[in-house]
Image (spheres, rainbow, N blue to C red):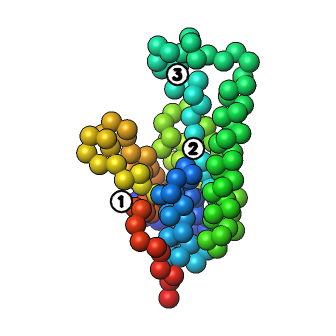
Amino acid sequence: MTTPDPSTADGVVLIAYDGSANADHAIDVAGALLGGGTAEIVHAWEPVSSAAARSAVYAIAYDESGALLERERELAQETADAGVARARAAGFEATGAARSGSGPLWQTVVERAEELHPRLIVMGTRGLTGIRSALAGSVSRHVTSHAEVPVLTVPLGEEPRRGR
């Protein structure tokens, strides 16, 4: 187990956000537990063209104009902006951005954490179990396994309770 760096104790919280109800809930719980603070939202996304390049459909799906990629970027940033708004409503001073990486989504989150050195990563879980989890992969499981800072994974559940 990695010992947390004391210099980050009052630092930024990195919140991985995908626009889902689970991600919204994770922000609400983090706000209730931490009482706000500084947060950075990261929306990790993968362009359809990157996913398609790994499949036989790539030649059909290829978009030479770049219009599809530009629209994907816009939608990804809109998702990040929604996460920032949610974090601000939960009491955080928040900024954020959409980031596309060269690997899986979890890797994009971990790479941002390595750059930022947050005191904590917060993320929701998708709630997949069994074969669905094995097939889809678990972003939260991979982030938890690879991050060098503590990770708070919040399952969808009851409403958060405010701290003392």
The residue indicated by pointer 3 is: 52
Q: Are marks 2 and 1 in contact (CB under 8 Å)?
A: no
Asked if residue 18 shows in the view, the reply is yes
The furthest residue to the top: 59
> In this orientation, which residue lies closer to the viewer: 127 or 34?
127
CA gap between label 2 and label 1 equals 25 Å
Q: Residue at x 65, y 70 (%)?
A: 89
Report the side of 52 relative to 77 (left or right): left
Say what amino acid the circle numbered 2 marks: Ala
User: From the viewer's perspective, is the residue at label 3 or at label 1 nearer?
Assistant: 3
Q: Residue at x 48, y 44 (%)?
A: 106
Q: Which residue is more in the foreground, 23 or 150?
A: 23
Alpha carbons under labels 3 and 2: distance apart? 17 Å
Say which label, 3 or 1, has the lower sequence index.
1
Instruction: Report the amino acid beneath label 1.
Output: Met
The answer to whether residue 63 is left or right of residue 119 is right
Position of residue 128 measured from the top left corner of the image (x, y, whole percent): 34, 48
At which x and y percent is residue 108? 54, 42
**Residue at left offset 42%, top offset 62%:** 156
Under mark 3, the amino acid is Ala
Q: Quadrant of the N terminus?
A: bottom left
Q: From the viewer's perspective, is the residue at label 3 or at label 2 nearer?
A: 3
Residue 9 position, x and y percent, is 55, 71
* Secondary element at image label 1: loop
Q: Secondary structure at mark 2?
A: strand
The residue under label 1 is 1
Relative image position of residue 160 (x, y in whole percent):
47, 75
The local secondary structure at tag 3 comes to: helix
Q: Residue at x 54, y 15 (%)?
A: 58
Q: Residue furthest left?
A: 130
Residue tagged by mark 2?
A: 44
Separation (CA) of disc 3 from disc 1? 37 Å
